[in-house]
């Protein structure tokens, strides 16, 4: 989870996974005859929003990487000479939206959902018979 970048927490990741899974679920419903144009419009709308969120997070990462590259060029290279300065410059050129925060958020989400499902099995509600 990356502090300050919206959409990379477990709620954002849950939304993105859900939105990108919607077309597959809707294809199955269409094959079973339980879909409609109205449902497909909702799927396209959610898919478009999720794609825009993902693209904006990626562009934010590029912008922050560019700003850090500029900052690193002006500050770090003046202070530190040699191999370390070049290494810091190369790191700053990379998109700051790294796969590690996305992986951590996804893993956290999977742990939370797994725990929730386990608790659902353990604490079954009593039937009303």
Image: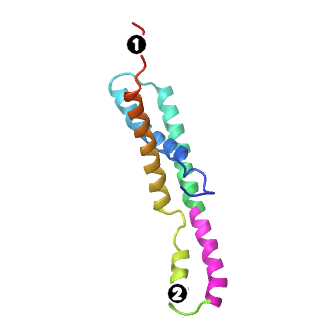
Residue 54, position as x, y percentages in the image: 53, 52
Quick one: which residue is furthest to the bottom in this view?
82
In this rendered view, identify the residue nearer to me: 116 or 104. Answer: 116
Query: In the rendering, at what x and y percent does residue 70 appear?
Result: 64, 78
Picture quarter with the C terminus: top left
Instruction: Using a 10 Å C-alpha cutoff, classify the residue at mark 2 as few (fewer than 14 neighbours), some (14 to 19) or many (20 or more).
Output: few
Question: At 57% across and 66% down in the image, what residue appears?
Answer: 62
Q: Which mark is residue 84?
A: 2
Cα separation, mark 2 vs mark 1, equals 66 Å
Residue at image position (39%, 22%) is: 34
- Left or right for 43, reference 68: left
Asked if the stretch drawn in magenta spans residue 74, the answer is: yes
Please identify, in this view, whether the residue under mark 2 or under mark 1 is nearer the observer. Answer: 1
The residue lying toward the viewer, choosing from 79 and 16, is 79
Residue drawn 50% across the image and 58% down it = 101
Q: Which image quarter: residue 71?
A: bottom right
The residue beneath circle 1 is 127
Pick out the residue farthest to the top. 129
Q: Is residue 4 above or below residue 75?
A: above
Q: Name the residue nearer the viewer: 25 or 102.
A: 102
Secondary structure that dominates the magenta span: helix
- In terms of secondary structure, where does tag 2 sit? helix
Relative to residue 21, is residue 1 drawn left or right?
right
Q: Which residues are magenta?
A: 61-79
Residue 1 in percent (x, y) is at 53, 55
Label 1: which secondary element: loop
Coordinates of residue 83 in the picture (x, y in percent)? 50, 90
Look at the image and say whether residue 41 sits in the magenta stretch: no
| Relative side of 125 to 48, left or right | left
Write the residue at 51% across / 79% down: 90
| Vertical arrangement, residue 69 with respect to residue 114, above or below | below
């Amino acid at each position: 989870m990356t502090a300050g970048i919206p959409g990379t927490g477990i709620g954002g990741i849950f939304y993105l996974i859900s939105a990108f899974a919607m077309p597959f679920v809707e294809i199955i419903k269409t094959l079973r005859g339980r879909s409609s144009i109205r449902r497909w419009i909702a799927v396209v709308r959610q898919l478009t929003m999720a794609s825009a969120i993902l693209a904006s997070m990626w562009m934010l990462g590029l912008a922050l990487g560019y700003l850090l590259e500029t900052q690193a060029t002006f500050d770090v290279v003046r202070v530190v000479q040699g191999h370390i300065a070049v290494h810091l410059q190369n790191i700053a050129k990379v998109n700051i939206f790294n796969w590690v925060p996305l992986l951590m958020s996804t893993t956290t989400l999977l742990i939370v959902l797994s725990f929730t499902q386990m608790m659902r099995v353990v604490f079954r509600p009593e039937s009303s018979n």
